[in-house]
Image (cartoon, rainbow, N blue to C red):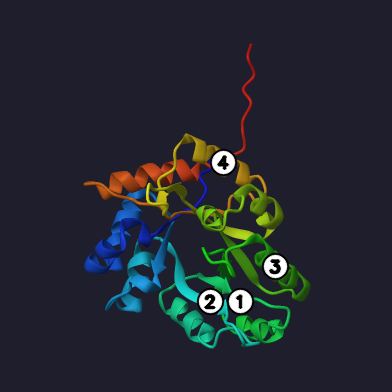
Amino acid sequence: MHKYPVSISLSSYGADLVRQQGQLSFVEVLAAAGAQRIEWREELLTDEQPTELAQAAAQQDLESVFSSPLELWVAGRAQANAELAATLDRAQAFGSRWLKVSLGYFTDTNDLESLHALLNRHSVQLLVENDQTLHGGRIEPMQRFFTEVERVGLPVKMTFDIGNWQWQDQSALTAARLLGRHVDYLHCKAVARRADGKLVALPPGATDLHLWEQLLKHMTPGISRAVEFPLQGDDLVAVTAQQVAALALLGQPRVEHAHV
């Protein structure tokens, strides 16, 4: 059975641990656990050198995604975020094939042509994610944006974060039905509400994995899927490998066995 590519968002190991140990220290963990991709987290970088991280990932045959908290569109500005060009360059310096950002404040007056020209000058693929905000984490603005992406022919795909829809009390299944064809990267996390009312990310149970299977039916078969839920334990390789194995099998064609 062909296993689909699994990425690990390094935020899964906890912000404090990642900042303390550095993102380089997790490259061998991911390789040993059988992951195919590593998601560098810009907000967790300390003094790491891009070239060093890029080389380490390449030596382990890990592709990489560069995740930035950047919002693609800022309020009151027609052009894309002024920091986008530098962030695309930074993603490339980290050896990443993909740059993941949030949508931000998309309106009908945004200048998609200048964005198109900028993206044509870069080899990094731009991925736009639904975040947890009212302006960038709801189905409607994502639909409006990707309708324009299709119309203009922009080389932009979607990161579909399964759990984030819950912050806006929207259905991930509805979102998958409406946006699934644009998705190139699936961020996986289960979500629960604590006693104090706060939503938190959790590893998936059987019910979550079943839901994720349903979501994938609306997306291109075999897309990359990422762990973005807590990976904790004394043996991080074993903990990571268990989740990599589970996610790699999601969306596999079902083989019917004849009974004779």
Please give the residue where the numbered disc 4 appears in the rendered image: 211
Which numbered dot is residue 71?
2
Q: Is residue 199 above or below residue 94?
A: above
Q: Nearer the viewer, residue 64 or 20?
A: 20
Q: Nearer the viewer, residue 128 or 89?
A: 128
Residue 129 in percent (x, y) is at 56, 65
* Residue depicted at 45% across the width and 41% down the height: 246
Look at label 1 and name its amino acid: Tyr
Q: Are marks 1 and 2 in contact (CB under 8 Å)?
A: yes
Q: Secondary structure at mark 1?
A: loop
The amino acid type found where label 4 is placed reads Leu
Q: Classify 143 as above or below 106.
A: above
- Residue 63, horizontal then vertical, whole percent: 45, 63
For marks 4 and 3, give the CA distance.
Answer: 24 Å
Mark 3, residue position = 146
Please give the name of the residue rendered at 54% of the width and 71% of the height, measured from the top-left corner. 102
Rendered-image quadrant of the C terminus:
top right
Q: Amino acid at mark 3?
A: Phe
> What amino acid is found at the position of numbered circle 2 in the picture?
Glu
Residue depicted at x 30% and y 67%: 23
Disc 1: which residue: 105
Q: Earlier in the sequence, mark 4 or mark 1?
A: 1
Instruction: Say the numbered circle drawn on residue 34.
Output: none
Mark 4: give few (<14), some (14-19) or many (20+) Cα within 10 Å: few
The disc, 4 or 3, on the residue closer to the chain's N-terminal end is 3
User: In terms of sequence position, does the residue under pointer 4 or pointer 2 come before the other?
Assistant: 2
Q: Label 2: few (<14), some or many (≥20) within 10 Å?
A: many
Instruction: Please tell me whether mark 4 sits on a helix, a strand or a loop.
Output: helix
Where residue 185 appears, x then y in whole percent?
Answer: 55, 59
Q: Secondary structure at mark 3?
A: helix
Which of the two marks, 3 or 1, is nearer to us in this view?
1
